[in-house]
Image (tube, rainbow, N blue to C red):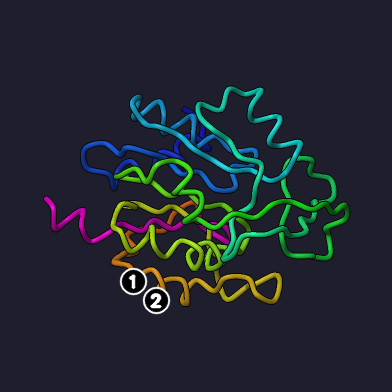
């Protein structure tokens, strides 16, 4: 198992039993869907990736479930997506200085995404959506209030470094997720400007 796969597997240490579903938001050129599917073979996988080239590439790689070509936000509609110069597989909804090419993509709310896939239980919510985590949470309040999401893995900024106005602040997200019963249990894969964080719903301890 390479370093990327080892990092993607960290969340498995926080899971008792087996999850039912992976909601993989902003899949990008990563492979958490493959890593977690190997650890939990019965895992159902649903994802979204709005970058057209990356969406096509992921399907060619054998993404093991439905992969929608949409972004996730606080309300449905359309939005401009900005490509990253020199990187054919990543983009952002923030118009940062290094973004060059731009295109329009559809936006779904997290609640809309959940409705489309039948409101399953024991969900791992994986978000790598370049600063739009708060928007995803605000658009998924019904889902997050239901307790069906048990684990969340997301990328957060470190040291107060936010590359654009509106980028999700980790302290604000911590407070927001606590309102839905989530406890931040780990930080890992640390870099100077960002790291991964894991949240677990309190029901995982209460039900045990």
Q: In the rendering, at what x and y percent does residue 148 appear?
A: 30, 52
Q: How many marks?
A: 2
The answer to whether the residues at label 2 and label 1 have Cβ atoms under 8 Å apart is: yes
Q: In the rendering, at what x and y percent does residue 203 appear?
A: 20, 57
Residue at 33% in and 73% down: 179
Q: Which residues, given as a range, are shown in magenta?
A: 190-208
Tell me, yes or no, whether the highlighted magenta stretch contains residue 198. yes
Residue at 65% in and 75% down: 166
Q: In the rendering, at what x and y percent does residue 24 appear?
A: 50, 43
Q: In the rendering, at what x and y percent does residue 199 appear?
A: 36, 58
- Residue receiving disc 2: 175
Label 2 to label 1: alpha-carbon separation? 5 Å
Q: Where on the picture, by quarter, is residue 145? A: bottom left
Q: Residues within 10 Å of mark 1 (few under 14, many from 20)?
A: some
Q: Is residue 8 above or below residue 198?
A: above
Q: Is residue 153 above or below residue 136?
A: above
Q: Nearer the viewer, residue 139 or 33?
A: 139
Residue at 34% in and 43% down: 120
Tell me, yes or no, whether the highlighted magenta stretch contains residue 118. no
In the picture, measured across the screen, residue 126 lies left or right of residue 146, that is: right
Residue at 42% in and 65% down: 141
- Residue receiving disc 1: 178
In the picture, measured across the screen, residue 194 lies left or right of residue 178, that is: right
Q: Where on the picture, by quarter, is residue 187? A: bottom left
């Amino acid at each position: 198992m390479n370093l990327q796969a080892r990092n993607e597997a960290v969340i498995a240490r926080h899971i008792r039993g087996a999850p039912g579903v992976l909601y993989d938001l902003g899949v990008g050129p990563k492979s958490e869907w493959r890593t977690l599917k190997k650890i939990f073979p019965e895992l159902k996988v649903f994802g979204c990736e709005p970058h057209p080239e990356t969406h096509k590439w992921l399907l060619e790689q054998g993404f093991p479930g439905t992969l929608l070509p949409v972004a996730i936000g606080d309300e449905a509609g359309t939005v401009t997506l900005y490509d990253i110069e020199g990187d054919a597989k990543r983009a952002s909804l923030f118009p940062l200085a290094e973004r060059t090419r731009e295109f329009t993509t559809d936006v779904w709310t997290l609640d809309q995404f959940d409705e489309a896939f039948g409101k399953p239980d024991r969900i791992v919510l994986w978000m790598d959506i370049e600063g739009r985590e708060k928007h995803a949470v605000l658009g998924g309040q019904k889902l997050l209030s239901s307790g069906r999401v048990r684990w969340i893995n997301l990328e957060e900024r470190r040291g107060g470094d936010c590359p654009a106005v509106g980028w999700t602040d980790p302290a604000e997200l911590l407070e927001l997720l606590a309102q839905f019963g989530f406890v931040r249990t780990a930080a890992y894969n640390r870099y100077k400007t960002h790291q991964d964080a894991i949240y677990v719903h309190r029901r995982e301890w209460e039900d045990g």
